[in-house]
Amino acid sequence: MKRFCVKCGKQTESLIGGLCKECYTGANRLFELPKKISIQKDRRNGKIRHGRLWLANTDENIAKILKEHIMKMARPARLLPQNLSIVLSSEGHEDLMKAEISFDVKIDDLTIPFKENVKLDFDQVLSDASMKLVSYYHEAIIQIRFEDVPLIERQREGVQEVLVALQTVRERGDDLAEAIDTKKVRGGYDLYIGSKKAAKMVARRFTKSKKAEVTYSNKLIGLDKQGKENYRHTFCIRFFGKKP
């Protein structure tokens, strides 16, 4: 049975508070998005903040952050956005982006479309991990040594193997899994690692690969604010000599 809109007189099968869809959306602002949404970006490594996590700066992760932002804003109005679409575009600079946001909202028997453009503002900050690393914070040292006396190229290959293994750990979520410094020493190189856990995982990887022998030691360097002992952890990776 058709009914009449009390405002424009249009015949329709569905009304919201006596109004047709056009009159209702004209008189009511369904959803108010800010003109600009800010996302924190680590200026050292480029990652973006999502709650307590720091994620890779990808369109997928940006859209994920925006989606949760929109759903949170819709909650007080008791709206449930459906068919949510977020299309990102650059405005000539990696930190200048625009998001075209569209979705449907169902009120009573009517489905009302919503579409709006929002600018994204990337706030340049330092994450807790980055603040530690730029202040030369390190929990462990990986010593790279060799069973024989290798050529310079072999030494560099050994360092690169360790750095690749370290990157794998970092990609799994340990933001302190970085070599903040590399020092040439007698017999090889010393790598200063932000994360003790990451250094241990790298050392274990070389033990399993049977490419090297790994030894471990630690040294008391002081007490923290709670009186707990702090240790500097050292993992020595000694590469086996190449067979003739």
Image (cartoon, grey):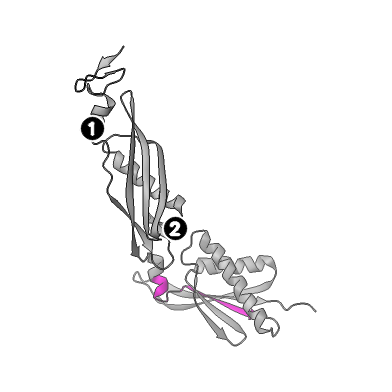
Residue 22 sits in which quadrant?
top left
- Residue located beneath label 1 in the image: 26
Three-letter amino acid code at disc 1? Gly
Quadrant of the snapshot with the N terminus: top left
Quadrant of the snapshot with the C terminus: bottom right
Picture coordinates of residue 163, whole percent (x, y): 57, 71
Please tell me whether residue 139 is drawn above or below residue 13 in the rendered image.
below
Rendered residue at 29%/34% (across/down): 78
Residue 1 or residue 237, whichever sits in front: 1
Question: Is disc 2 placed on a helix, strand or loop?
Answer: loop
Residue 103 or residue 218, whichever sits in front: 103
Q: Nearer the viewer, mark 1 or mark 2?
A: 1
Q: Is residue 215 left or right of residue 66?
A: right
- Report if residue 237 is visible in the image: no
Residue 205 or residue 49, whichever sits in front: 49
Residue 28 sits in which quadrant?
top left
- Circle 1 packing at 10 Å, graded few (<14), some (14-19), many (20+), is few
Three-letter amino acid code at disc 2? Asn
Residue 137 sits in which quadrant?
bottom left
Question: Is disc 1 placed on a helix, strand or loop?
Answer: helix
The part of the chain drawn in magenta is 132-145
- Residue located beneath label 2 in the image: 57
Rendered residue at 39%/66% (across/down): 43
Q: Is residue 53 left or right of residue 183?
A: left
First along the sequence among labels 1 and 2: 1
Rendered residue at 34%/64% (across/down): 124
Q: CA distance from mark 1 to mark 2?
A: 38 Å
Q: Report the residue that reaches farthest toward the left.
A: 7
